[in-house]
Image (cartoon, rainbow, N blue to C red):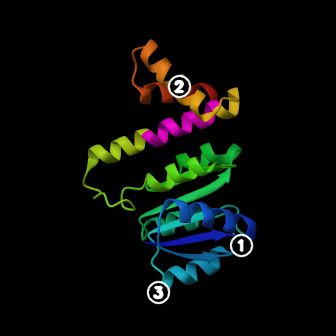
Amino acid sequence: MNSLIISSNRENISLIEQYLKESISGFIVTAGSGNEARRLISGDTRPDLVIIDTPLSDEFGQELAEITATTSGGVVLICRNDISENISHNLSRNIAVLTRPFSREEFRNVVESFPELIGIKPESTDILTKIEEMRLINRAKCTLMEYLNFTEPQAHRYIEKQAMNNRRTRRETAEKILDTYKK
């Protein structure tokens, strides 16, 4: 598997590269700007996964994410928490938004949520629905962690308990949490 990390910050590239090596195997290429990434992609580099750490030195990175999403298995757009909700609503389905700061676990969950990267055929709609549900629940967990200072296990337990107590699915509970805190 080939991965492309795009970031203007060398420290962030090192951290993302370290987390990526723990999650998936393969060849990792890095780029320091959007223009450099475009040159790599238009050349011989055909990445299965593209990770864009915004903002880049020559652009924000959202347009680059949309362009690379058409040629790669998945795109992860890393941005500040305060703009993540606006960005995620405007992006294609195979682009995941990861808010900064993030943990190893959050990074791994996002990377492994791309079905093409873990060998699942896109025709499997049941699995894609489950993955989308996992993303939604993870966003709700992050919201609880941000607004209520929960740990990840506490947020997970809270969502499970609310779903059982209110006789709702975890997805419905996650949507309600996101609606409540992301106004």
Q: Earlier in the sequence, mark 3 or mark 2?
A: 3
- In the rendered structure, which amino acid carries the disc numbered 1? Asp
Examine the rendered structure and indicate whether residue 15 appears above or below residue 82.
below
Q: Which mark is residue 157?
A: 2
Dot 3 crowding, Cα within 10 Å, few <14, some 14–19, many 20+: few
Residue at image position (41%, 65%) is 73
Whether residue 45 is visible here, answered yes or no, is: yes
The residue that disc 1 covers is: 58
Q: Nearer the viewer, mark 3 or mark 1?
A: 3
Circle count? 3
The residue that disc 3 covers is: 44
- In the rendered structure, which amino acid carries the disc numbered 2? Arg
Residue at image position (67%, 75%) is 33
Q: CA distance from mark 3 to mark 1?
A: 22 Å
Query: Which residue is outermost to the top?
Result: 165
- In the rendered structure, which amino acid carries the disc numbered 3? Asp
> x, y (%) of residue 57?
74, 71
Residue at image position (55%, 63%) is 20
> x, y (%) of residue 119?
32, 61
> x, y (%) of residue 101?
70, 49
The magenta region covers 134-144
- Quadrant in which the C terminus is drawn: top right
Q: CA distance from mark 3 to mark 2?
A: 46 Å
Q: Earlier in the sequence, mark 1 or mark 2?
A: 1
Residue 121 on the magenta segment? no
Q: Main secondary structure of the magenta part?
A: helix
Q: Secondary structure at mark 2?
A: helix
